[in-house]
Amino acid sequence: MNELVFFINNVVIAGSVTGAIYAIGAIGVTLVFSIMRFAHFAHADIMTFGAFMVLVLTTAFPSVGMSIGVPTALVMLPVAMVITACLAVGIDKAFYKPLRAHGVKPIVMVIASLGVTLILQGMIRLFSGTGGQGLYVDDRKAIFRMLPFENVRVPIVITEPQIYLFAITLVAVIALHLFLSRSRLGKAMRAMSDNPELAQASGINTNTIVAVTWVIAGGLAAIAGTLLSLDVTFKPDLSFFLLLPIFAAAIVGGVGHPFGAVAGGFVVAFAETLAVFNWGVFLRPFRDSLPTWLELPSNLAFVGTEYKIVVPFFILVAILIWRPTGIFKGKVI
Amino acid sequence: MPLIEARDVYGGYGSMNILNGVNMALEAHEVGVIVGPNGAGKSTLLKAIFGLLHVNQGDILLNGAPIQNLPTNQLVERGMGFVPQEKNVFPSLTVQENLEMGAFLKPQNVKRMLGQVYEFFPPLQEKRHQPAGELSGGQRQMVAMGRALMAEPSLLLLDEPTAGLSPLYMNEIFDRVKHINAAGVGILMVEQNAKQALAIADKGFVLAAGQNRFTDTGAALLADPDVAKSFLGG
Amino acid sequence: MADNNYTPQDATPKTSSLPLRELCLFGALLIAIAGVYAMMGAAYSTRMLVEAACYAILALGLTIQWGYAGQFNAGVMGFVALGGVSAMLFSVPVNEAFWGSELPAELGKVLLYAIGATLLVVAATKLNRLGVPKRVRTVFAVVLAIVLYMVVISLLRDVTAEIESQAGFIGGLGLPPWTGWIVGGALAGVVGYFIGNVCLGLRSDYLAIATLGIAEIIKAFLKNSDWLTRGTATVSPLPWPTPGPETLGFTLSRAIYLSLTAVIIAAIFFLLHRAYHAPWGRMIRAIRDNEVSAAAMGKDINKRRLEIFVLGCILMGVGGGILASFNSLFDPNGYLPLNHTFLVLVMVILGGPGNNLGTIFGAVAVYIIWIMSEPLALYLMDLAVAFGAFAFDWQAPSTIDSRALQARVMVIGILVTLVLRFAPKGLLPEHIKQHD
């Protein structure tokens, strides 16, 4: 049973945590893609920016959370979401809108978003330095240990931020669903993603929709970045390592399909954790009963953790070869 | 004062003119039909009126006020509705959501107008929770027209509403157009089925090479041997 | 559309008139180079020029992908690193500690196992021809592939661990560096073929995502395969194909290396120029400018696209090899997206995508600015720190120097966005010619 607990800790919990983060990131990418039709490479850095804002605010007012009993970082999250949403809208106004007005090809927008990536990266590192920093400044990270089975030495471990992470992810996804299916602006967003010309002919102000999209994408990016930094630490240089799994998740889920992106996020995350999991653990109990010529190597993982990035790439290539529209049939090939 | 009027309009894509001095005028509550050979600029004229195309010269007046080159959402606000020929629904939205998008600028209208549109197009009511992309061509055309009606336009522009439809649906659509007009909406449409369209038209405009060739009532154009010979296939 | 509104008069060739723009820009570049020589000394400046020349090769690779064909490669770094590792493996002296042991045989055995395993899996996928139901075959093949992969990877892990503990790394082949450059180009071409095959039929964004990913993977592999590359321990010195500084001194030896790279660039330039004006080049540009009509004319679009993408990758591989040999150091951690992808991108879009001369101009000009911006950024930061300490009693963090260098990241980003907006065709735009 120790092995099962080990599996739960290293695959089920770790995979769900990463999956939730990828999912929220991928929703933002897929929304931007469906409204503006380009792969927004600066998304991972907007995530980092959001987390950095939380870090700054938490450092400035470290004891706010104590009075209400939640980590200060979470109290600051809504503020950071607003700031990040403003940043996203501002970036669009300054960099993407003029290019859109010129009617450039989507790939030029991609390059522009890479330029924005560099600007954000430089800015964040200029102020934060390049090292990692914890978002728990004055608070204590609570860790829960559970012993669900008898005769088991290892507990199932789940930390406080992970519980918040699942709750926030759930709330965010449900809120987005309600927004897209019930609200006038949400429906208009879906309409614009379906057929931008007709949306315009219906009197929908496409500039408003674009701005709303950026607000949502920015807010979600702040959530994703903060949750990631809460779970581990704030690192300014995650950008390119986050981009690949997030894009893979968006494409797996079918681009332009927010709930596909959620599924894609979990698919990619579980593929990653399963690939780096040492399957030798499950064979260990049988070690004594195995014939002597079959000597088990100590490490039976598919890829080492240092090659984790291979997994989303492999998934990306596989989906592009066999089903470029994604598992839920996205709109864009 | 005419509901919609085009005075000597030149326009097209870039610096190339497709419209070379078109004139037309339509009174309120009238049905106007634009016919002519392929490439005459029929759809182009419609797009120019709806601000989807740059007007290089001339005036387009809605209720006497110039509207050329205004953004489309302002034209919708001023009471114009446009139904494109192709891609005229939001395929992943349900029928009802499609219709709601039509009233995007007038959200207070939604309830009342939904009832009215379902009255015009009864088949839509039972399919209202189905994605529009799953409907047949004729039903999509109904969704498209319904969507445009949601904003309570005083003028409805239809770009070849019967293109690609079976004769059964074609008659149905012409019938609906008459009904909508009877409810007080002015209609300007481009049609390939010239005879059928002119039969319900108060005014007809025969375009060729981006200019008016004949302008008269629908009945008079149908009776005109010149028009019949050159444009209506004998 | 803004970029389509040139009139036919503009489109006629202007080659007969004096290329004033080119002359002015290159004149300014010469003055800048002379200035660097005067300030920083000949040895330093010649090194800068050689590096700029290597970057020019990379930029030519990117300009044919982006400028000729509209393909955006966001992973130049990966192809450069492949060239670098190949140059290292071919030119570094033979490691007797490895070859003298039984380890090469062990490694060979693992390689044979890997080939055997691949054949077995391929055979398993054909089992349906023997009457095995397709579903059973698929399950069997997948399970077999997983098990065999585990076996081979475990064996490989054992052998590579042995190599690392006994011999350090496998060492080089002791061959002349140019063999490594050629193989590096080929290696980059093979990887480019694989990526291009997957992505070129799809939206152009997907190519950018995939190349970005493969670059990070190549870097991760080179960084962690200590048995092959010594990983973060780095390999140096890499021999030069030309006489080294120990015999001729820095300036002269570097000047000879520079002339070597200049000859290579001239050869590439000449060949590209020929290809650009040949039917092949016209076809490539026709596809870029109007895919639909090019396809309607019966041109095999994806094949042509793949050709151009692979060609660009090969150039990047070769350039990466030459660069690594010149630096005389192979350090997988030294490959950064900023230095080896985005800097090259700026060179191309600033110089003029699709214009080889403009690209070379962009490469040299941007590299000079880049190199000179390092002391400038540090100086400005020092100034800011001194001001802060003086005016606000501000204690600067100790990492201030590394942060100053981050400011350059920002400058590159701003440059990219500004050029895209205000000079989308670069300083030396591609000559649009009327084809008759």
Image (cartoon, grey):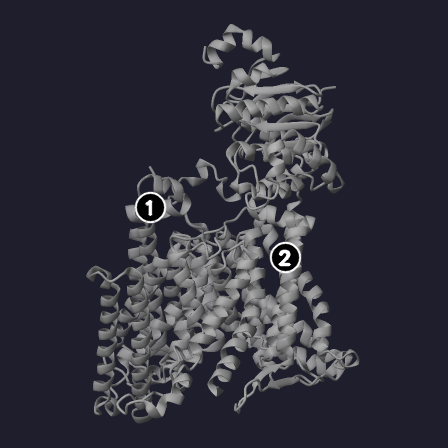
Question: Which residue is disc 2 drawn over?
Answer: A177
Using the image, tell me which numbered label, if any, was put on residue C282: 1
Relative to the observer, which residue lies in front, C289 or B35? Answer: B35
Task: Report x, y in % for residue C46.
Answer: 40, 74
Residue A80 occupies which quadrant of the picture?
bottom right
Tell me the subunit letter for badge 2: A
Image: A114 above or below C17: below
Q: Label 2, secondary structure: give it.
A: helix
- Image side of residue C203 versus residue B123, left or right: left
- Image side of residue B62 versus residue A201, left or right: right
Q: Count all numbered tags in the image, as a single digit.
A: 2
Dot 1 alpha-carbon crowd within 10 angstroms: few under 14, some 14 to 19, many 20 or more? some
The reply to whether residue C75 is in sight is no
Task: Report x, y in % for residue C393.
Answer: 75, 84
Tell me the subunit letter for badge 1: C
Q: Label 1, secondary structure: give it.
A: helix
Which residue type does callout 2 highlight? His
Disc 1 versus disc 2: distance between alpha carbons?
49 Å
Residue found at the far right of this picture:
A67
The reply to whether residue B132 is in sight is yes
Relative to the observer, which residue lies in front, C6 or C337? Answer: C337
Residue at 53%, 61% in the rendered image? A261
Residue at 71%, 32% in the rendered image? B152
Task: Report x, y in % for residue B223.
Answer: 55, 7
Relative to the observer, which residue lies in front, C297 or C366? Answer: C297
Which residue type does callout 1 highlight? Arg
Q: Are marks 1 and 2 on the same chain?
A: no
Using the image, tell me which numbered label, if any, was put on residue B232: none
Labels 1, 2: front one: 2
Task: Report x, y in % for residue C297.
Answer: 32, 39
Dot 2 alpha-carbon crowd within 10 angstroms: few under 14, some 14 to 19, many 20 or more? some
Residue found at the far front of this picture:
A150
